[in-house]
Amino acid sequence: MRAPALYSAAGTLLLTTLAAAPADSVRTVPGAAEVRGTAVAAARARVAGIDFGTCPEAENLPDGMRCGTVSVPLDYARPDGKQIRLTVSRAPATQKDPHNSKRLLPRQGALVYNPGGPGASGMAFPLIGVLPEWKRLAAVYDFVGYAPRGVGRSAPLSCKDPGTFFKAPSQAPTHPSESYKRERIAQAKAYARGCAERAGDSLRHYTSLNNARDLDVLRAALGEEKLTFMGASYGTYFGALYATLFPSHVRRMVFDSAVNPDPEQIWYRNNLDQSAAFEGRWEDLREWIAKHDDVYGLGDTSEEVLRSYEKARARLAAKPAGGKVGPGQLQGAFLSAGYYDDYWPRRAQALSAYLKGDPKPLIQQAGPRPAAAAEAENSKAVYTAVECNDARWPTEWRVWDRDNTRLARVAPFETWDNVWMNLPCAYWPAPRQRPLDVRTGPGELPPTLILAAERDAATPYGGAVELHRRLSGSVLVTERDAGTHGVAGGPNPCVNGHVDAYLLEGRLPARRAACGPRPEPRPTAAGARKVPAAEPASR
């Protein structure tokens, strides 16, 4: 599943049969050797602990944060073989009652967090404890973040020269030509080769199952008998793998914006569902902009806003803004707004200003940032390796072309961009795994909490329902008529109340619960003059 840091309801329509990968390129899920290897690594980590000290300058974290490392096997089937080091950050529990400064609260252990990806780092997570929505939790938990294997300084993975990572300006055709498709296929093959050449034999060990095993070693290194964990987006998937592999090691788990863990969905079909869902989210954004036509002047209906957007696309295709923002960069900026409502006012203001003759806000928001190229390249490399290694993908272009051509007829906004992001998996050189069947029976796992926004496009709502069905004793809390990706700690006190009750006291609703939507974003003034309905082609 794509995370916005990496980029940039037609599921039944597209239940196609995947072209099976060659038998010798698919590995069955590892068994006894990995179980033993994880136990060996966790026992070592418990003895070694984590020597927390000053954070390295490279982490760019404030002085109050503490950092350390934990060793894990590259290959859990060979726990005495090559080791890699994962970077870890921590802010100790304040033990200060936010409502009574004279009262000290008992510490409850470590709360480990993963923000998703694959390819995102959680090293900055402990900083969030200063925000009002998190202070109660930060009082009783050590907030622990970490960079998963391959990310940041944790045995970093790379697939190409970061200096060539950003290609701007770029096109983003919603109905690409055959020649454009051939060009992107060639790029996907080259990218897959680059991953293999740079990572070598290590490439196959970047998987969700190993992320789950690493989490158990981290638990042991922190001195925790049982894990308290919050995962967002992709973090819910390997968190669910952890719950299946190590149910007796779980204390409490929060799954925020859950990935559909059905093995048949990992990962090809999940990405089809994501592309379909983003069309609805794009409609939500346009309707919001239309509601504030007096501010943005982009049209007072969704259709008129779309015409304004397409006008900008055409103009950028002819003459990129600042020489570096083309249709691809415009699409990427508005795709990120599909993840977070908070982005809506700035994106609408930038589009409005551009069409009125001022490209600066759009260049600022959508233009490539060379200083971030190394981090972005690393994130995409990890994303690609994990998703390609985790499961079988269609290996014939005709399957991708057929499925996504059909989908793009009804959901053109993200479909082909998602294809190009994932297409290296069609030509992946490393062995594939068969996804684990996420499932726990009654009494195997302590009660867990699942959070989901009803209109989330990055992880469509059906995934949370499926995870709830598979994890016995879980409770699903739904944020109604909302679509922001990641709902914990946001502006919805109902959602936050359920999170606090669970993590602080172990209390969950008796059954599925619902919260009303979060407040809509407020428009940012950008001038009320209407964009002309038509203008000379020379402009």
Image (cartoon, rainbow, N blue to C red):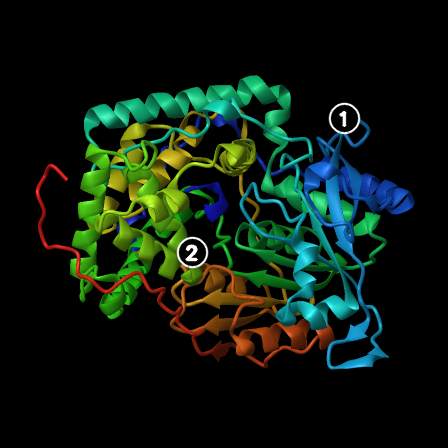
- Residue 445 in view, yes or no: no
Residue farthest to the right, as pictured: 47
Q: Separation of disc 2 and disc 1 at Cα?
A: 38 Å
Above or below for 196 versus 209: above
Q: Residue at x 23, y 47 (%)?
A: 357
Q: Nearer the viewer, residue 165 or 173?
A: 165
Depth check, front residue: 253 or 510: 253
Measuring from the top left, give residue 61's x and y in whole percent. Answer: 70, 47
Up-down relation of residue 185 to residue 350 (above or below):
above
Pointer 2 residue = 339
Side of 535 relative to 227 (left or right): left
The amino acid marked with disc number 2 is: Tyr
Instruction: Determine whether the residue tagged by mark 1 lies in a helix, strand or loop.
Output: loop
Compared across the picture, whether 261 is left or right of 530 comes to: right
Instruction: Work out whether 223 lies above or below 165.
Output: below
Residue type at mark 1?
Answer: Lys
Q: Earlier in the sequence, mark 2 or mark 1?
A: 1
